[in-house]
Image: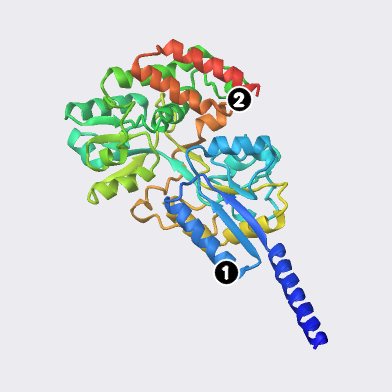
Amino acid sequence: MKKIILSLALSGLLLSCNKSNDTTQKKTLVITSNSHAQEPSSIALQEIIDEYTKSNPEIKIDFIPGSSDYEETMKTKMATNSLPDIFATHGWSINRYKEYLEPLNDREWAQYVSPAIKPVITDTNEKFYVLPLDVDIVGLPYNLDVLEKAGVDPKTIKTTDDFLVALEKVKNIGVTPIYLGGKDSASIGNIYDWIAPGLIILTNDNPQGENLKNGIFDEKAWNITGEFIKTLKDNGYINRDALTGNDAARALGTGKAAFLFFGTSMIREGLTYNPDARMDFIALPTKERDQKSYFITGERLALGAWKDSPNKKEALDFLDYLAKPENISKMATANVLPTGLTNAKSDLGKFESSYDLGDKYQYVGFFDREYLPSGAWETLCSIGAGIISGQLTVEEASKKMKEDFDKLKNK
Protein backbone atom coordinates (compact mmCIF):
# COMPACT_ATOMS: atom_id res chain seq x y z
CA MET A 1 0.00 0.00 0.00
CA LYS A 2 2.84 2.33 0.91
CA LYS A 3 4.45 1.56 -2.45
CA ILE A 4 1.25 2.48 -4.27
CA ILE A 5 0.93 5.77 -2.36
CA LEU A 6 4.59 6.59 -2.99
CA SER A 7 4.18 5.77 -6.68
CA LEU A 8 1.14 8.03 -6.95
CA ALA A 9 2.97 10.80 -5.12
CA LEU A 10 5.93 10.54 -7.47
CA SER A 11 3.60 10.55 -10.47
CA GLY A 12 1.91 13.68 -9.19
CA LEU A 13 5.23 15.34 -8.58
CA LEU A 14 6.43 14.51 -12.08
CA LEU A 15 3.17 15.78 -13.56
CA SER A 16 3.54 18.96 -11.56
CA CYS A 17 7.12 19.38 -12.79
CA ASN A 18 6.06 18.81 -16.38
CA LYS A 19 3.36 21.43 -16.07
CA SER A 20 5.90 23.82 -14.58
CA ASN A 21 8.29 23.15 -17.43
CA ASP A 22 5.52 23.75 -19.98
CA THR A 23 4.88 27.14 -18.45
CA THR A 24 8.52 28.19 -18.31
CA GLN A 25 9.14 27.06 -21.87
CA LYS A 26 6.36 29.24 -23.24
CA LYS A 27 7.85 32.41 -24.71
CA THR A 28 6.11 35.73 -24.24
CA LEU A 29 6.61 38.45 -26.85
CA VAL A 30 5.69 42.04 -26.14
CA ILE A 31 4.61 44.12 -29.15
CA THR A 32 3.88 47.83 -28.94
CA SER A 33 2.39 50.13 -31.55
CA ASN A 34 1.83 53.83 -31.97
CA SER A 35 -1.73 53.11 -33.20
CA HIS A 36 -4.42 53.45 -30.55
CA ALA A 37 -6.52 50.46 -29.49
CA GLN A 38 -9.61 51.33 -31.51
CA GLU A 39 -7.79 52.20 -34.73
CA PRO A 40 -8.46 49.74 -37.57
CA SER A 41 -4.76 48.85 -37.78
CA SER A 42 -4.64 47.83 -34.10
CA ILE A 43 -7.72 45.68 -34.51
CA ALA A 44 -6.25 44.05 -37.63
CA LEU A 45 -2.90 43.42 -35.91
CA GLN A 46 -4.61 41.78 -32.93
CA GLU A 47 -6.50 39.46 -35.29
CA ILE A 48 -3.23 38.44 -36.97
CA ILE A 49 -1.63 37.87 -33.56
CA ASP A 50 -4.54 35.64 -32.53
CA GLU A 51 -4.14 33.54 -35.68
CA TYR A 52 -0.39 33.25 -35.11
CA THR A 53 -0.67 32.10 -31.50
CA LYS A 54 -3.25 29.48 -32.48
CA SER A 55 -0.69 27.92 -34.80
CA ASN A 56 2.17 28.52 -32.37
CA PRO A 57 0.82 27.64 -28.91
CA GLU A 58 4.30 27.80 -27.42
CA ILE A 59 4.27 31.58 -28.02
CA LYS A 60 2.26 34.12 -26.03
CA ILE A 61 2.02 37.65 -27.42
CA ASP A 62 1.10 40.68 -25.36
CA PHE A 63 0.06 43.45 -27.76
CA ILE A 64 0.08 46.95 -26.25
CA PRO A 65 -1.58 49.54 -28.53
CA GLY A 66 -0.30 53.11 -28.49
CA SER A 67 -1.27 56.04 -26.34
CA SER A 68 -0.74 59.78 -26.44
CA ASP A 69 2.57 59.42 -24.59
CA TYR A 70 3.95 56.62 -26.78
CA GLU A 71 6.95 58.67 -27.88
CA GLU A 72 7.93 59.61 -24.32
CA THR A 73 7.46 56.03 -23.17
CA MET A 74 9.79 54.79 -25.88
CA LYS A 75 12.41 57.41 -24.99
CA THR A 76 12.37 56.13 -21.41
CA LYS A 77 12.72 52.52 -22.57
CA MET A 78 15.65 53.47 -24.82
CA ALA A 79 17.36 55.18 -21.91
CA THR A 80 17.11 52.01 -19.82
CA ASN A 81 17.67 49.62 -22.76
CA SER A 82 14.48 47.77 -21.87
CA LEU A 83 12.54 47.89 -25.11
CA PRO A 84 9.67 45.66 -26.22
CA ASP A 85 10.56 42.62 -28.31
CA ILE A 86 8.83 44.24 -31.31
CA PHE A 87 7.87 47.90 -31.51
CA ALA A 88 6.56 50.50 -33.93
CA THR A 89 9.06 53.18 -34.90
CA HIS A 90 6.50 55.89 -35.80
CA GLY A 91 8.69 57.37 -38.52
CA TRP A 92 12.03 57.17 -36.72
CA SER A 93 13.45 53.76 -37.62
CA ILE A 94 16.74 55.30 -38.80
CA ASN A 95 17.22 58.61 -37.01
CA ARG A 96 16.12 57.47 -33.55
CA TYR A 97 15.82 53.70 -33.20
CA LYS A 98 18.45 52.27 -35.56
CA GLU A 99 20.97 51.38 -32.87
CA TYR A 100 18.33 49.39 -30.98
CA LEU A 101 16.99 47.40 -33.92
CA GLU A 102 18.00 44.20 -35.65
CA PRO A 103 18.86 44.65 -39.37
CA LEU A 104 16.31 42.89 -41.56
CA ASN A 105 17.97 42.85 -44.99
CA ASP A 106 18.47 39.07 -44.86
CA ARG A 107 14.78 38.21 -44.35
CA GLU A 108 13.14 36.45 -47.29
CA TRP A 109 10.57 39.23 -47.71
CA ALA A 110 13.24 41.97 -47.86
CA GLN A 111 13.35 41.72 -51.65
CA TYR A 112 9.78 43.01 -51.81
CA VAL A 113 10.19 46.26 -49.84
CA SER A 114 8.40 48.96 -51.81
CA PRO A 115 10.63 51.49 -53.61
CA ALA A 116 8.27 54.18 -52.29
CA ILE A 117 9.31 53.48 -48.70
CA LYS A 118 12.78 51.93 -49.05
CA PRO A 119 14.77 55.21 -49.18
CA VAL A 120 13.01 56.43 -46.03
CA ILE A 121 13.85 53.35 -43.95
CA THR A 122 17.35 52.63 -45.32
CA ASP A 123 20.56 53.99 -43.77
CA THR A 124 23.77 55.02 -45.52
CA ASN A 125 25.02 51.42 -45.30
CA GLU A 126 21.99 50.20 -47.26
CA LYS A 127 20.54 48.49 -44.17
CA PHE A 128 16.96 48.73 -42.98
CA TYR A 129 15.51 47.73 -39.64
CA VAL A 130 11.72 47.55 -39.91
CA LEU A 131 8.98 45.69 -41.70
CA PRO A 132 6.92 48.44 -43.40
CA LEU A 133 3.31 47.30 -43.27
CA ASP A 134 2.18 50.20 -45.44
CA VAL A 135 3.45 53.41 -47.01
CA ASP A 136 2.23 56.69 -45.59
CA ILE A 137 1.55 59.00 -48.53
CA VAL A 138 0.52 62.49 -47.51
CA GLY A 139 -1.21 65.03 -49.68
CA LEU A 140 -3.67 67.81 -48.97
CA PRO A 141 -7.22 66.51 -48.28
CA TYR A 142 -10.03 68.57 -49.82
CA ASN A 143 -13.80 68.67 -50.25
CA LEU A 144 -14.59 68.80 -53.96
CA ASP A 145 -18.18 69.96 -53.41
CA VAL A 146 -16.87 73.09 -51.68
CA LEU A 147 -14.15 73.75 -54.25
CA GLU A 148 -16.53 73.44 -57.21
CA LYS A 149 -18.91 75.88 -55.56
CA ALA A 150 -15.98 78.29 -55.13
CA GLY A 151 -14.87 77.83 -58.74
CA VAL A 152 -11.62 76.03 -57.84
CA ASP A 153 -10.19 73.09 -59.75
CA PRO A 154 -7.91 71.37 -57.21
CA LYS A 155 -5.80 69.83 -59.97
CA THR A 156 -4.64 73.29 -61.05
CA ILE A 157 -3.09 74.06 -57.65
CA LYS A 158 0.64 73.69 -58.29
CA THR A 159 2.27 76.55 -56.35
CA THR A 160 1.73 78.20 -52.99
CA ASP A 161 0.44 81.26 -54.87
CA ASP A 162 -2.15 79.03 -56.59
CA PHE A 163 -3.10 77.68 -53.18
CA LEU A 164 -3.60 81.15 -51.68
CA VAL A 165 -5.79 82.18 -54.63
CA ALA A 166 -7.93 79.07 -54.07
CA LEU A 167 -8.25 79.84 -50.35
CA GLU A 168 -9.46 83.37 -51.14
CA LYS A 169 -12.14 82.00 -53.46
CA VAL A 170 -13.34 79.58 -50.77
CA LYS A 171 -13.43 82.37 -48.20
CA ASN A 172 -15.58 84.45 -50.57
CA ILE A 173 -18.37 81.82 -50.52
CA GLY A 174 -18.48 81.88 -46.72
CA VAL A 175 -16.69 78.58 -46.08
CA THR A 176 -13.61 78.11 -43.89
CA PRO A 177 -10.71 77.51 -46.29
CA ILE A 178 -8.54 75.49 -43.86
CA TYR A 179 -9.67 73.82 -40.65
CA LEU A 180 -7.03 73.45 -37.96
CA GLY A 181 -7.69 71.50 -34.77
CA GLY A 182 -5.72 73.06 -31.96
CA LYS A 183 -6.64 70.43 -29.38
CA ASP A 184 -4.68 68.13 -31.64
CA SER A 185 -1.64 70.33 -32.20
CA ALA A 186 -0.54 68.02 -35.01
CA SER A 187 -2.47 70.01 -37.60
CA ILE A 188 -0.53 73.16 -36.69
CA GLY A 189 2.80 71.34 -36.76
CA ASN A 190 1.73 69.75 -40.04
CA ILE A 191 1.60 73.13 -41.78
CA TYR A 192 5.34 73.43 -41.23
CA ASP A 193 5.96 69.75 -41.87
CA TRP A 194 4.08 69.70 -45.16
CA ILE A 195 4.67 73.18 -46.57
CA ALA A 196 8.32 73.72 -45.58
CA PRO A 197 9.67 71.35 -48.27
CA GLY A 198 7.99 73.42 -51.00
CA LEU A 199 9.14 76.72 -49.53
CA ILE A 200 12.74 76.10 -48.46
CA ILE A 201 13.84 72.64 -49.67
CA LEU A 202 12.45 72.03 -53.20
CA THR A 203 13.41 75.47 -54.42
CA ASN A 204 15.94 76.94 -56.82
CA ASP A 205 16.50 79.93 -54.54
CA ASN A 206 18.69 79.19 -51.51
CA PRO A 207 17.53 75.61 -50.71
CA GLN A 208 18.13 74.71 -47.08
CA GLY A 209 18.13 70.92 -47.13
CA GLU A 210 21.87 70.35 -46.89
CA ASN A 211 22.29 73.13 -44.34
CA LEU A 212 19.70 71.62 -42.02
CA LYS A 213 21.12 68.12 -42.37
CA ASN A 214 24.56 69.52 -41.53
CA GLY A 215 23.26 71.25 -38.40
CA ILE A 216 23.09 74.77 -39.86
CA PHE A 217 19.90 76.71 -39.17
CA ASP A 218 19.29 79.91 -41.17
CA GLU A 219 16.74 82.08 -39.36
CA LYS A 220 16.17 84.33 -42.35
CA ALA A 221 15.38 81.40 -44.62
CA TRP A 222 13.14 79.89 -41.95
CA ASN A 223 11.15 83.14 -41.78
CA ILE A 224 9.54 82.15 -45.11
CA THR A 225 7.67 79.32 -43.38
CA GLY A 226 6.45 81.56 -40.58
CA GLU A 227 5.33 84.22 -43.03
CA PHE A 228 3.20 81.63 -44.80
CA ILE A 229 1.39 80.72 -41.57
CA LYS A 230 0.95 84.39 -40.71
CA THR A 231 -0.58 84.96 -44.17
CA LEU A 232 -3.11 82.21 -43.52
CA LYS A 233 -4.04 83.78 -40.20
CA ASP A 234 -4.09 87.44 -41.34
CA ASN A 235 -6.28 86.69 -44.35
CA GLY A 236 -8.84 84.70 -42.39
CA TYR A 237 -8.04 81.42 -44.14
CA ILE A 238 -8.15 79.31 -40.97
CA ASN A 239 -10.97 78.67 -38.50
CA ARG A 240 -11.29 81.14 -35.65
CA ASP A 241 -11.06 78.36 -33.05
CA ALA A 242 -7.86 76.98 -34.58
CA LEU A 243 -6.23 76.70 -31.14
CA THR A 244 -9.17 75.00 -29.44
CA GLY A 245 -11.23 73.26 -32.14
CA ASN A 246 -11.28 69.52 -32.55
CA ASP A 247 -13.73 68.77 -35.35
CA ALA A 248 -11.63 68.51 -38.50
CA ALA A 249 -13.16 65.38 -40.04
CA ARG A 250 -16.71 66.62 -39.52
CA ALA A 251 -15.81 70.04 -40.96
CA LEU A 252 -14.38 68.50 -44.12
CA GLY A 253 -17.10 65.90 -44.56
CA THR A 254 -19.99 68.31 -44.08
CA GLY A 255 -18.52 71.03 -46.27
CA LYS A 256 -17.72 73.46 -43.47
CA ALA A 257 -14.10 73.50 -44.61
CA ALA A 258 -12.31 73.06 -47.92
CA PHE A 259 -8.87 71.76 -46.86
CA LEU A 260 -7.19 70.04 -43.90
CA PHE A 261 -3.61 69.72 -42.76
CA PHE A 262 -4.33 66.24 -41.46
CA GLY A 263 -3.60 62.81 -42.90
CA THR A 264 -5.81 61.28 -45.54
CA SER A 265 -7.43 59.06 -42.89
CA MET A 266 -9.53 62.15 -42.14
CA ILE A 267 -11.22 61.63 -45.51
CA ARG A 268 -12.42 58.24 -44.39
CA GLU A 269 -13.59 59.66 -41.09
CA GLY A 270 -15.28 62.57 -42.86
CA LEU A 271 -17.40 60.11 -44.82
CA THR A 272 -18.93 58.90 -41.56
CA TYR A 273 -20.50 62.35 -41.20
CA ASN A 274 -21.55 62.62 -44.84
CA PRO A 275 -21.32 59.44 -46.94
CA ASP A 276 -22.15 61.43 -50.09
CA ALA A 277 -19.32 63.94 -49.73
CA ARG A 278 -16.78 64.00 -52.55
CA MET A 279 -13.35 64.16 -50.99
CA ASP A 280 -9.85 63.40 -52.19
CA PHE A 281 -6.31 64.77 -51.84
CA ILE A 282 -3.83 66.63 -54.02
CA ALA A 283 -0.06 67.00 -54.10
CA LEU A 284 1.47 69.77 -52.01
CA PRO A 285 2.44 73.03 -53.71
CA THR A 286 5.93 74.41 -54.29
CA LYS A 287 7.00 78.04 -54.25
CA GLU A 288 8.36 77.92 -57.79
CA ARG A 289 6.33 76.80 -60.80
CA ASP A 290 9.18 74.94 -62.45
CA GLN A 291 9.36 72.60 -59.46
CA LYS A 292 7.05 69.58 -59.46
CA SER A 293 4.46 69.50 -56.69
CA TYR A 294 5.15 66.75 -54.19
CA PHE A 295 3.81 64.09 -51.88
CA ILE A 296 5.28 63.23 -48.51
CA THR A 297 6.10 59.59 -47.90
CA GLY A 298 7.10 57.86 -44.71
CA GLU A 299 6.42 55.16 -42.16
CA ARG A 300 2.79 54.91 -41.11
CA LEU A 301 3.04 51.56 -39.32
CA ALA A 302 6.42 49.86 -39.36
CA LEU A 303 7.62 47.28 -36.82
CA GLY A 304 11.14 46.31 -35.87
CA ALA A 305 12.73 43.74 -33.53
CA TRP A 306 14.80 44.86 -30.54
CA LYS A 307 18.32 43.60 -31.23
CA ASP A 308 18.94 42.77 -27.55
CA SER A 309 15.64 40.99 -27.01
CA PRO A 310 15.97 37.68 -25.13
CA ASN A 311 13.28 36.47 -27.55
CA LYS A 312 14.87 37.81 -30.73
CA LYS A 313 14.49 34.57 -32.70
CA GLU A 314 10.78 34.41 -31.89
CA ALA A 315 10.38 38.11 -32.65
CA LEU A 316 11.93 37.67 -36.09
CA ASP A 317 9.76 34.62 -36.74
CA PHE A 318 6.65 36.67 -35.98
CA LEU A 319 7.80 39.48 -38.28
CA ASP A 320 8.23 36.90 -41.03
CA TYR A 321 4.68 35.71 -40.40
CA LEU A 322 3.41 39.29 -40.45
CA ALA A 323 5.20 39.80 -43.78
CA LYS A 324 3.05 37.20 -45.52
CA PRO A 325 1.20 38.89 -48.41
CA GLU A 326 -2.24 38.28 -46.91
CA ASN A 327 -1.20 39.89 -43.62
CA ILE A 328 0.48 42.86 -45.27
CA SER A 329 -2.67 43.36 -47.37
CA LYS A 330 -4.84 43.26 -44.26
CA MET A 331 -2.72 45.80 -42.38
CA ALA A 332 -2.40 48.25 -45.29
CA THR A 333 -6.10 48.00 -46.09
CA ALA A 334 -6.89 48.84 -42.46
CA ASN A 335 -5.03 52.14 -42.88
CA VAL A 336 -6.30 52.65 -46.47
CA LEU A 337 -2.73 52.96 -47.71
CA PRO A 338 -0.53 51.24 -50.30
CA THR A 339 1.33 48.17 -49.06
CA GLY A 340 4.91 48.34 -47.80
CA LEU A 341 5.79 45.16 -49.71
CA THR A 342 5.27 44.86 -53.45
CA ASN A 343 4.12 41.22 -53.37
CA ALA A 344 0.93 42.32 -51.59
CA LYS A 345 -1.88 44.68 -52.56
CA SER A 346 -4.28 46.62 -50.38
CA ASP A 347 -7.91 47.45 -51.03
CA LEU A 348 -7.94 51.23 -51.47
CA GLY A 349 -11.56 51.37 -52.58
CA LYS A 350 -12.57 54.67 -54.15
CA PHE A 351 -9.04 56.04 -53.57
CA GLU A 352 -7.35 53.51 -55.86
CA SER A 353 -6.70 56.11 -58.58
CA SER A 354 -5.61 58.73 -56.04
CA TYR A 355 -2.65 56.58 -55.04
CA ASP A 356 -1.65 55.87 -58.64
CA LEU A 357 0.82 58.73 -58.49
CA GLY A 358 3.40 58.01 -61.19
CA ASP A 359 6.53 60.09 -61.79
CA LYS A 360 4.99 63.50 -62.42
CA TYR A 361 5.44 64.40 -58.75
CA GLN A 362 8.32 64.68 -56.33
CA TYR A 363 8.46 62.59 -53.16
CA VAL A 364 9.99 63.73 -49.90
CA GLY A 365 10.15 62.36 -46.37
CA PHE A 366 8.41 64.04 -43.45
CA PHE A 367 10.22 67.33 -42.95
CA ASP A 368 10.83 67.06 -39.19
CA ARG A 369 12.17 63.50 -39.54
CA GLU A 370 14.43 64.32 -42.50
CA TYR A 371 15.79 67.75 -41.60
CA LEU A 372 15.26 68.45 -37.90
CA PRO A 373 16.74 66.81 -34.79
CA SER A 374 14.62 64.48 -32.68
CA GLY A 375 12.31 66.44 -30.41
CA ALA A 376 11.86 69.42 -32.76
CA TRP A 377 8.29 68.41 -33.64
CA GLU A 378 7.01 69.88 -30.38
CA THR A 379 8.72 73.17 -31.26
CA LEU A 380 7.00 73.26 -34.66
CA CYS A 381 3.63 72.89 -32.97
CA SER A 382 4.33 75.53 -30.32
CA ILE A 383 5.77 78.23 -32.59
CA GLY A 384 2.96 77.68 -35.10
CA ALA A 385 0.43 78.17 -32.32
CA GLY A 386 2.38 81.25 -31.21
CA ILE A 387 2.10 82.87 -34.63
CA ILE A 388 -1.60 82.04 -34.94
CA SER A 389 -2.37 83.41 -31.46
CA GLY A 390 -0.28 86.52 -32.07
CA GLN A 391 1.97 85.75 -29.12
CA LEU A 392 4.99 85.33 -31.39
CA THR A 393 6.15 87.36 -34.35
CA VAL A 394 7.59 85.50 -37.30
CA GLU A 395 11.08 86.53 -36.25
CA GLU A 396 10.52 85.43 -32.64
CA ALA A 397 9.22 82.08 -33.86
CA SER A 398 12.34 81.61 -36.01
CA LYS A 399 14.59 82.53 -33.10
CA LYS A 400 12.87 79.96 -30.88
CA MET A 401 13.18 77.35 -33.62
CA LYS A 402 16.92 78.02 -33.94
CA GLU A 403 17.44 77.82 -30.17
CA ASP A 404 15.73 74.42 -29.97
CA PHE A 405 17.39 73.19 -33.18
CA ASP A 406 20.85 73.97 -31.80
CA LYS A 407 20.05 72.47 -28.42
CA LEU A 408 18.50 69.28 -29.76
CA LYS A 409 21.09 68.57 -32.46
CA ASN A 410 23.74 68.15 -29.77
CA LYS A 411 21.78 65.62 -27.73
Q: Give amino acid for label 1.
A: Lys
Quarter of the rendering containing residue 322:
bottom right
Q: Does residue 323 appear anywhere in the picture?
A: no
Secondary element type, mark 2: helix
Q: Which residue is mark 1?
A: 54
Q: Tell me residue 246's x, y (percent).
A: 32, 35
Q: CA distance from mark 2 to mark 1?
A: 47 Å
**Mark 1: few, some, or many residues within 10 Å (few <14, many ≥20)?**
few
Q: Which is more toward the observer, 235 or 200?
A: 235
Whether residue 378 is situated above or below residue 107 in the rendered picture: above
* Residue for point 61% across, 61% down: 60
Q: Tell me residue 182's x, y (percent).
A: 36, 29
Q: Which is more toward the observer, 363 or 339?
A: 339
Q: Tell me residue 247's x, y (percent).
A: 29, 37
Q: Which mark is residue 81?
A: none
Q: Is residue 399 left or right of residue 308?
A: left
Q: Which is more toward the observer, 43 or 190?
A: 43
**Mark 2: few, some, or many residues within 10 Å (few <14, many ≥20)?**
some
Q: Which residue is mark 2?
A: 213
Q: Nearer the viewer, mark 2 or mark 1?
A: 1
Which tag, 2 or 1, sits closer to the chain's start?
1
Q: Is residue 162 left or right of residue 32?
A: left
Q: How many marks?
A: 2
Residue lying farthest to the front in this orientation: 1
Figure quadrant of the C terminus: top right
Whether residue 102 is situated above or below residue 330 in the rendered picture: above
Residue lying farthest to the bottom in this orientation: 1
Whether residue 80 is situated above or below residue 371 in the rendered picture: below
Q: Does residue 271 appear anywhere in the picture?
A: yes
Q: Is residue 312 left or right of residue 185?
A: right
Whether residue 46 is situated above or below residue 252 in the rendered picture: below
Q: Give amino acid for label 2.
A: Lys
